[in-house]
Image (cartoon, rainbow, N blue to C red):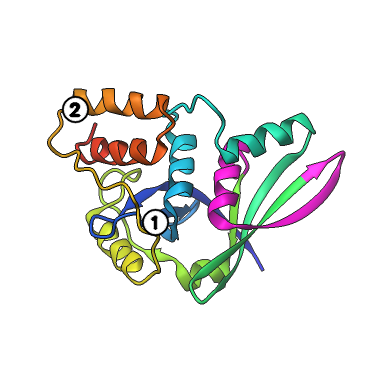
Amino acid sequence: MSLVRLNIKGISYSQTQNGAYALILSEEDGERKLPIVIGAFEAQSIAIALEKEIKPPRPLTHDLFKNFSDRFEIVIKQVIIHKLVDGVFYSSIICEKDQLEEIIDARTSDAIALALRFKAPIFTYKNILDKAGIYLKTPGNEDEISKKEEAVIEELIMGEEKESRSYSEDFSKHTLKELKNMLDQAVVNEDYEKAAAIRDEISKRGK
């Protein structure tokens, strides 16, 4: 089976379902997107690795794994999303130490969070992309998630079992300056759930 390389396009947060996220992957040499519903913690970890705006004062779980691997000279070479069963994606992490290769099963969200930290490529098989890929062309900026894609992704999230987010404070009444100060304070306090909620509000305003 042929492998297709995927790039991370972004993370979509459900406007109707608290705590529901979809990680959007896009095929490198095509226009299909692969949306994967993930939990809030994994979404935060991936967002931190992608944006580098939130710098935790202490390592998160995926950062700890990276530091541990670096210390013992273990390298993640690639991640492969190798199976799709009943809407659940299964992944393998391809690791190497002393020129010996090992394959480790992992949740897709964890595998991708680690792939980002190791700068490792992400692949899936063509038949999985044929089955679960969304063929939508985004007009304008290819780096942004279009309204049409958001609607399809929202539908996907609505059909999945979701983890509810316990943080429910309304940040919409705060100014952008206040939000940025609150974001910095939340990171200092290691309240990453609050930090993610504030970041979502900042992102909604296009800043």
> Residue beneath label 1, please?
22
Q: Nearer the viewer, residue 206 or 60?
A: 60
The residue drawn where x is 20% and y is 25% is 178
Q: In the rendered structure, does residue 103 fall within the stretch colored magenta?
A: yes
Q: Which residues are magenta?
A: 96-120
Q: Residue furthest bottom?
A: 86
Residue 207: % across, % down: 24, 31
> Residue beneath label 2, please?
176
**Residue 167 vertical position relative to residue 104 in the rendered view, above or below:** above
Of the two numbered discs 1 and 2 on the same chain, state the one appearing first in sequence: 1
The residue drawn where x is 46% and y is 47% is 41
**Residue 76 vertical position relative to residue 125 in the rendered view, above or below:** above
Q: Name the image quarter holding the N terminus.
A: bottom right
Q: Is residue 97 left or right of residue 58?
A: right
Q: In the rendered structure, does residue 79 fall within the stretch colored magenta?
A: no
Give, as a three-letter code, the residue at label 1.
Ala
Q: Is residue 159 left or right of residue 146?
A: right
CA neighbours of label 1 inside 10 A, class few (<14), some (14 to 19), many (20+): many
Residue 147: % across, % down: 22, 55
Q: Is residue 115 left or right of residue 142?
A: right
Give, as a three-letter code, the residue at label 2.
Leu
Q: Residue furthest left?
A: 173
Residue 174: % across, % down: 15, 32
